[in-house]
Image: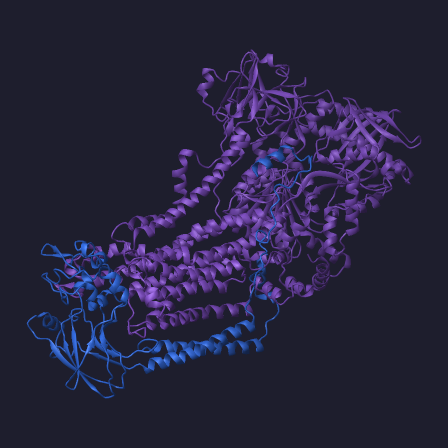
Chain colours: A blue, B purple
Amino acid sequence: MNNSAAGTSSGSGDVSAPRRNSNRPKYSRFTQQELPACKPILTPRWVISVFTLIGVIFIPIGIAALRASTNVVEIVKRYDADCIPGNNTKAYKVAYIQDKNIDKTCNITLRVPKDMDPPIYVYYQLDNFYQNHRRYVKSRNDAQLKDRGKANDTSGCDPEDASNGSPIVPCGLIAWSLFNDTYNFSIGNQNLTVNKRGISWKSDRDHKFGNDVFPRNFQNGTLIGGASLDENTPLSQQEDLIVWMRTAALPTFRKSYGKIEQNLRENDTITVTIKNNYNTYSFSGKKKLVLSTSSWLGGKNDFIGITYLTIGGLCFFLAIAFTGVYLVKPRKLGDPSYLSWNRNPSGR
Amino acid sequence: MARGRRRKLLLSRLHAFACGASSSQVDVSQVGGPGFSRVAFANESNSVEAANLNYGANYVSTTKYTVASFVPKALFEQFRRVANIYFLLTGCLSFTPLAPYSAGSAILPLIVVIGATMAKEAIEDWRRYQQDIEVNNRKVKLHQGEGAFRSTEWRNLRVGDIVKVEKDSFFPADLVMLSSSYDDGLCYVETMNLDGETNLKLKQSLEVTSGLHSDSSYQNFNAIIKCEDPNANLYTYVGTIEYGDQQYSLSPQQLLLRDSKLRNTDYIYGVVVFTGHDTKVMQNATNPPSKRSKIERLMGRLIYFLMASLVLISVIGSVVFGVITHDDLQDGKMKRWYLRPDDSTIYFDPRRAAVSAILHFLTAMILYTYFVPISLYVSIEIVKVLQTIFINQDIQMYHEESDKPAYARTSNLNEELGQVDTILSDKTGTLTCNSMEFIKCSIAGIAYGHGFTEVERAMARRKGFPLIEDEESKENHDHAKPAIKGFNFDDARLMNGQWVKEPHADVIRMFFRLLAICHTAIPEVDDATGKISYEAESPDEAAFVIAARELGFEFYQRTQTSISIRELDPSSGKHVERSYTLLNVIEFNSTRKRMSVIVQDDEGKLLLLSKGADSVMFERLANDGRKFEDKTKEQMHEYADAGLRTLVLGYCEIDEAEYKNFNEAFTEAKNSVSVDREEKMEAAADSIERNLILLGATAVEDKLQSGVPECIDKLAQAGIKLWVLTGDKMETAVNIGFACSLLRQGMKKIVITLEGQDIIRLEKEGDKRAIAKASKENVIYQINQGRQLVCSSTSESFALIIDGKSLAYALEDDVKNLFLQLAVGCASVICCRSSPKQKALVTRLVKEGTGKVTLAIGDGANDVGMLQEADIGIGISGAEGMQAVMASDVAISQFRFLERLLLVHGHWCYRRISTMICYFFYKNLTFGTTIFLYEAYTTFSGQAAYNDWYMSLYNVFFTSLPVIALGVFDQDVSARLCLKFPLLYQEGVQNMLFSWRRILGWMFTGVCNGILVFFFCITALQHQAFRKGGQVVSYDVLGGTMYTCVVWIVNCHMALSIRYFTAIQHIVIWGSIAVWYLFLLVYGAIPPAYSTNAYRVFVEVLAPAPSYWITTLFVTIATLIPYFTYSTIQMRFFPMYHNMIQWIRHDGQAEDLEYCHIVRQRSVRPTTVGVSARVDAKINQTVGVSPRVDAKINQSSSRRIHHVVNSP
């Protein structure tokens, strides 16, 4: 470019030998920005059909989702207050829960509102518990959990990295604060067995927690956090731990406790024997026990269904509204009086 | 002034007397004092004294960086962007435990961004460096002692060197001329690169040195030159030369300026006085500024705004965090015991909660980097480079004849092209092709010449009568006969000697004789072919002589006392040679506005031949010489209206006695040395130039480049103002103003000039202070007069014409705002005789005074300052060398390409970049808001909602390509419609697509979308099971779902906001979403040691869960509905201009001319300049409709007709 330009300028205008157009840009639709393009604009037909279409799709989904949600039977029972005798101060509750010598067994009863078909999922629900706190989330060591040889790898686990001079397996705040309330269910005198297998993700069991890694030196420190682990069971089989260590996203969360694989009839009364060990009293967290069936959509939550219906309805409404507006007030063709430069003529 | 002097000396050559004596005495008393300290030891540049002076070498560098300074300086440039500093700081901090995510993902993007930008700077500067090398290595002959001259590179020259410059080469530095190949020390200089004028200027050495003709005479040459310090004034020079124990004074007459060219002279010898950056031309050049577009500057402010809000939310977060952390431990009792607040690190220590809060502030600043789009800069760089390629590749801006496509030299300013408010244009070579063509004449009241001017063509096209047959015939004509430069006259009645058959053959003969005699041109006979060419002072003078030659009156010889022509003898039909004795030449100047010669023909008759402007000529006609006056006037009016420059020709016979009287008076006046010398000369001339007999008038076209009037018309319709800044004299400039429709009959002209009588009188008295004071007062007075005039009238349009001398005062600090107010009130502004510096100053005045975007366009080195000063500099890569192009931001080869460059590329680029930036803010705010809200749900502990790599790839993979595609390909309106509806351009000028309202609107949408996404997601995916298997939502599930929603939303939002889908758009938009899922698959398949909590999230957890898909669907739709509804309503009921055009196109009415016209016409602002305005004015005039009420109807109906015919 430069060379040829300099060349022509030195020749200063006298167009002598006709040259081939060496600098002529190549023509292509791409370089000339003339690619075939679809140029949709928001015509009334488009807008109304889009809104109608959304309505048509959303309302059935909404109905299905709402049905799924209403079909789910859910029993939620808060027990943290009931399982402490009397109606006491927070300080008393904390002292109570921290006292190792008190037997914290506590019985509550649940009434089944509707028939529940197995599997019935048992959850514990914690409230105001910040499993998503940055210090908490990071306080683990994945290598140590997976690999037997990396037991000493406790980086990031401070302050629960070592006790009595040797490393803790599994280390870190998450494992240390493992939930340790236990539930025993019975209907009348008959025990309900709770299946605690298969409550965690398979990939966690297979790939994140080693089947040859055993708990070691766990809960041996001066301060006991939560549950202890069986030193003879490999981590990959400690499903409570695995579930617990898949940290929750929000401060209110449920965790799988197990599954009850038998029918519950309406108005059955379930007696739950709770070992109320876990301290949520210091931070005023609630503890709830949840029994729930599931649908294709999961547990009980009307929100999705309602939202779908609302949006669907809104879209129908908009479709009608726009139809009306288009009919009543047809567009003034190319009326430029809205243009700002026509509005204030001072702008020369 | 300079011109006057030059003219005089040229004449002095024609006559042996008064050579040099008349040049005004230079005040040399100052030499040696402050400001005049330069000393050059001629021929002793190596001596100790010379070395002590330590003047720089002749090396010239125009680069921004040197090798050593590149890294620090370029880095400094980069980190002038506050955003980059911020990213650097967060990048560094991310290596500490403060970081909420891994360091690599934070610092890498910054390195890429900075690296890419610096590489671009380096390449651009390298190109400049190459250009410098070429210039610095040009060869010149240098005296090496012993009378030997050897060739050396320019860069080696030093002050005091004696150089020999040969014909047709450039002067390497500012030289004081010692002698030339001519005996009297004359030389011709072409100063096109300095002031754009193509005519040759005469320079002359001092008499004492003019005898040093040969190399050997410099063997023992010795002289000391003392002169002024380097300065930017091209037309002054004060100095002395000590030669042979005598001191002589030097004037600009001896100074040869760098970058001007030696012409018609075999060689000259000169002493170098200013080198390199000290030379006047370099002093005139301001430093190449690094230009940033308005949008980019506004974007900078936006980023400040974002960062301020970022600091704000970080502070809020930190305070909350501090309070909550402090509460965790009270009197040794732990609240959230699972965090072990009793044994915490400093980052979470309740006992030092304040410190923790401050550290958290840093963490938050890192976490929220996603509010500030880091990839914005690099994406914009990429987009701009691609846009540049499109500009360079545009086949419609390729000029076949010069084989040059458009060439955007910098990509920084693309979008600025869409916002130009005022164009400041050079004239010569930019609007015109820099050639004059004799096209028409009126002789004895009869109009001759069939040619059409560009203006006429343009007007005809507007009126709807394209001169098709005519154009075709002209083309055929061109093929038949090689066009003669300067001659475009076609009329069988006069050509080939046919004029003898015309009724007034004797008048015709006199007419052409006058053309052949009354001038100051010099013939040059080509020895080989015998062809004669002319060296004239100005192209129009050359055109006259050429016209005379072509019509059979060939001027072929000039001696000191005679002029010889060959002419056709009507009686014999043969060519006869005639010689006229040249008695007097009465020169042209801008007050006289005429030139005359007095000759004696073969028969001894004394003739006064005169040509001049109509204003002075008609009043000088004899009573019996007015036979054709009315008709001539009428025809001249037509010519002027067609944009031609006209001169009236007249003659008279004078008797011996009369002449004798005159000659005595004139000679006496000429030889007098008193201050009223010129007055006396003028009086003498005035006495003889009377009682003329009118012959006719000439019409010369200062040939406009093709398409210029249409282009100016389009630009005017687009609402762009055009100022013409030219070095030419006022008359020429005004003519061109007419030619390109900037001026028209009926426009009120406000002329500001210092040619008034009282100023001239003061000048004669010579008191500089008084002159300056009076001049300034005069200028202020005239400006105020003009302002009153403009204020008092609303209906008329005004044109402001100001000359260079007045401009100097008008640009003074206390006057310039007045001047600007006046100029802004005028439809056209023409500044004549302006120096390069003044051009730059005017540009700065407009730029800073109006705050609008200015574009300067020029083709010569004299425009460089202006090009650099303006927001955008456009260089015309014409014949005048490369200086303008090298200083420009975009180079085009024809003025008319400006139309496409601005209206199409400018508009597109503006729209693309502004939408792109808005979208960037939108998408990052959407994303950032979800991060912020999530952090709030973790008690502001600094935990991010998403996996590290989701976040760092957000701006790279999942959202970047659609926005780049938008920036490169989006078209609101096709090129054809852009040109059809020029007013669309106002969207850019008024910055409607990047107003605060719009930006904040986008930002608000972003924040709202973020809020909606977050709350929809956390409510839909609460604590309950989200799958049939009873599994509950964990951190990774919520993050994955929310992220999916964000990716869908920002990409679909893009799809909603563009109206131009090529396959590329489809691929990048839907592809980006697909890439997200693909990424989830691939990243999830990597062992958990790397993928951490993203391991198999998609395959195992999300994909099998219907609630994941259902949530994504409704969150996406629900979030987009408000925007969709908004844009539906806006599109339908409050359309912007481009929306209307889209409707027109969509409804298929783009072909319906009537309909288009309504839209166009109703939104067109009344234009005051351009062909349209002229046509409108003319229609109003001819139809005679009484003002305004009917005029509008009339105007619209006439327009409709134009468009019907004129559809492109």
Q: Quadrant of residue B639?
A: top right
Give the residue drawn at x 60%, y 29%: B260
Q: How many marks?
A: 0
Give the residue drawn at x 28%, y 72%: B1031
Relative vertical location of residue A109 with respect to residue B222 in this rendering, above or below:
below
Whole-percent x, y for residue B713 in the image: 66, 52
Is B1031 placed left or right of B32 in the picture? left
Relative vertical location of residue B433 with respect to residue A282 in this rendering, above or below:
above
Give the residue drawn at x 20%, y 66%: A237
Relative vertical location of residue B397 with respect to residue B312 in this rendering, above or below:
above
Is B1054 placed left or right of B91 in the picture? right
Residue B28 seen in render: no
Is B537 placed left or right of A162 in the picture? right
Whole-percent x, y for residue B419 in the image: 54, 52
Q: Between B190 and B1093, which is closer to the camera in this rendering?
A: B1093
Residue B1126 seen in render: yes
Is B333 placed left or right of B452 in the picture? left
Q: Between A115 and B373, which is closer to the camera in this rendering?
A: A115
Whole-percent x, y for residue B320 in the image: 25, 62
- Residue that extends furthest to the left in the rendered view of this protein: A101
Q: Quadrant of residue B1059?
A: bottom right
Q: Between B546 and B736, which is closer to the camera in this rendering?
A: B546
- Residue that extends furthest to the front in the rendered view of this protein: A212
